[in-house]
Amino acid sequence: MLISEIKALLTKEFILEWRQRYALNGILLYVVGSVFICYLSFNLNPGQIDPVTWNALFWIIMLFSAVNAISKSFMQEQSGRLIYYYTIASPEAIILAKIIYNFLLMLVLAFLGYIIYSLVMDSEVQDHLLFAAVLVLGSLGFSGTLTMVAGIAAKAGNNSALMAILSFPIVLPMLLIVIKVSKNAIDGLDRSVSTNSLLVLVAINAIVITLSYMLFPYLWRT
Amino acid sequence: MKKRWWKILTVFLLLYTTIGGLLFSVPRLPILNETIRNLYFHVPMWFGMTILFTASAVFSVKYLRTSKELDDMIASEFAFSGTLFGILGLLSGMTWARFTWGAWWINDPQLNSAVIGILIYLAYLVLRSSLEDEQQRAKISSIYNIFAFAALIPIIYVLPRMADNSLHPGKGGNPGFNIYDLDNTLRLVFYPAVIGWTLFGVWITSLRVRIKKIQAVKSSSNQ
C-alpha cells in the first residue's frame, strides 16, 4: 500500500518536473554557474589548487546547490493541491517520495557537478570508487535532512533565509564527515581508514530519515 | 515548603560551589595552576546545557502527543536556558583556553561542536519568532526541536570523540581528568556544582514559564 503510494507520488514528481523544466534547468545551471565562478575567482591554471581547497570548495558548492534545489520541493505546491494530497495519500508516503525524489535529484547534481568541476578545476581524486560512495551517501544525507527542513520552512512562510538558518547547523556534522572521507579518497588512502566515518555517515542518515518519517505526519496536519 | 526545598538546595549548592570552589585546596599542576578551579564553573555548564536541551526535547515530544500549549512553552524556555548555559560555557571555556592554551579560540572539535549546537538552538528561537499563529508555532517549532536534538547528539558526543586533534582532556592522546587529577578534593566540589548549576537552569526556566503564563492570561483578558 505504502509502496504503491510512493510509486504514484514519485511518478507525479517526475511528470511535474518534466512539465516545468525551468526548475530543473535552473538548478543545473546554478551548479554549473557556481563552479565556473569559483574557477574564475581562483583564476586557475589547472592543477595549481591544493587538494584541501579543492575538496572544501566542491562540497560548499554542493551544499548551496542542495539547499537551493531542495527548498523548492514544498514551495511549488500550492495550498489547494496540498489539501488534495491530504485526502488521497498518507503523510509517510509523501515524505518518503519527496526524499527519494530529492535523493535522485541530488545524485544528478552531485555527479554533474563533479564532472564539470573536475573538467575546469582538474580532478585530484585517486580512489574513484570511494569518492563515488561519498557522493551517493552525501546526496542521501542532504536530501534526508533538507527535505524535512524544507517542509518546516514551507510551513513558516517559504522564507528562503529561514531554510538556510535552519538547515546549516543540522547538516554541518554530516558535511564535515563527508569532507573528511572525500579528502581520504583524494589522497588515495587505504579504505580501512575511512570505514568508521562511512559507518557514522550511514548511521546519521538512518537517524535523520527515520525521524523525518516519524515527524512529518505532525507537520502535515498543521 | 513542599515545593520550595529544591530551590533552597540550589542556593546552598551554589554557595558551596562558589566558596568551596574558590577556597578549598586544589592539586597543583603545571600550566593549569589555579585555573583548575574553572572546572567547577565551565564543565557544569556543558552538563547543564545537555540536560536542559534534553528536557526541552522531552517536552516537545509531550506537546506533539497531547497538544497542550503549556508543554511547548516549557520546551521553548528550556531551549532558551540551555542556550544561555551553552554561551556561558563557551565564554568560561574561552577564558580558560586563553590562560592555559594561549589563545581565545583554537581549532578544537569540541569548540566547533559547541558553536554548532548553539547555532541550532538560536535557529530554533528565530523559527519561533517568525511564526505568528500560536498553535502553528507550537507544532512546527516542536518538530524542529526534536529533529535538531537528534542531530545535536552526534555533534556533541560522536564527532569530538572521532577527532584526534583535540586539546581537551581525555581526547586525542591527552590524559583524561580521571587519570591524573580528578582527585577526591575536586570531586567534593565538582559533583555538587553540576547538580547545583543544573537546578539553577531549571529554576530560571520555571520562572520564565511563570512570567509567560501571566503574560498569556493578561493578553487574553485584554482582548
Image (tube, grey):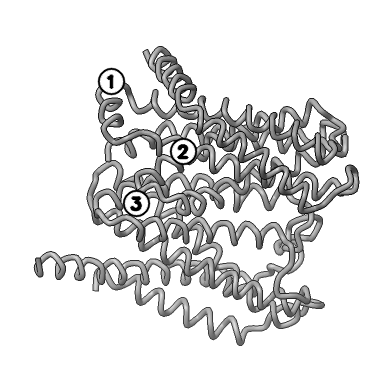
Disc ID at residue A222 = none
Q: Is residue A175 depicted above or below B116 in this figure?
A: above
Dot 1 or dot 2, earlier in sequence = 2
Alpha carbon of mark 3 to alpha carbon of mark 2: how far?
31 Å
Q: Residue at x 31, y 47 (%)?
A: B139
Q: Residue at x 40, y 33 (%)?
A: A214
Q: Residue B188: in sight, yes or no?
A: no
Direction from residue B97 to residue B67 in the image, left or right: left
Q: Circle 2 sits in a helix, a strand or a loop, which is it?
A: helix
Does label 3 lie on the same chain as label 1? Answer: no
Q: Chain of mark 2?
A: A
Q: Residue at x 45, y 41 (%)?
A: A150
| Amino acid at circle 2 | Lys
Residue A208 placement (x, y as % from top left): 52, 37
Q: Residue B26: in sight, yes or no?
A: yes
Disc ID at residue A88 = 1
Does label 2 lie on the same chain as label 3? Answer: no
| Amino acid at circle 3 | Phe
Alpha carbon of mark 1 to alpha carbon of mark 2: how far?
22 Å
- Provide the residue designation for mark 2: A72
Which of the two residues, A179 or B99, is positioned nearer the viewer here? A179
Direction from residue B39 to residue B119 in the image, left or right: left
**Nearer the camera: disc 3 or disc 2:** 2
Residue B162 placement (x, y as % from top left): 72, 47
Circles 3 and 2, Cβ within 8 Å, touching? The answer is no
Q: Residue at x 24, y 56 (%)?
A: B70
- Provide the residue designation for mark 3: B59
Q: Chain of mark 1?
A: A
| Amino acid at circle 1 | Ile
Specify the quadrant of the image occupied by residue A187.
top right
Residue A27 placement (x, y as % from top left): 57, 36
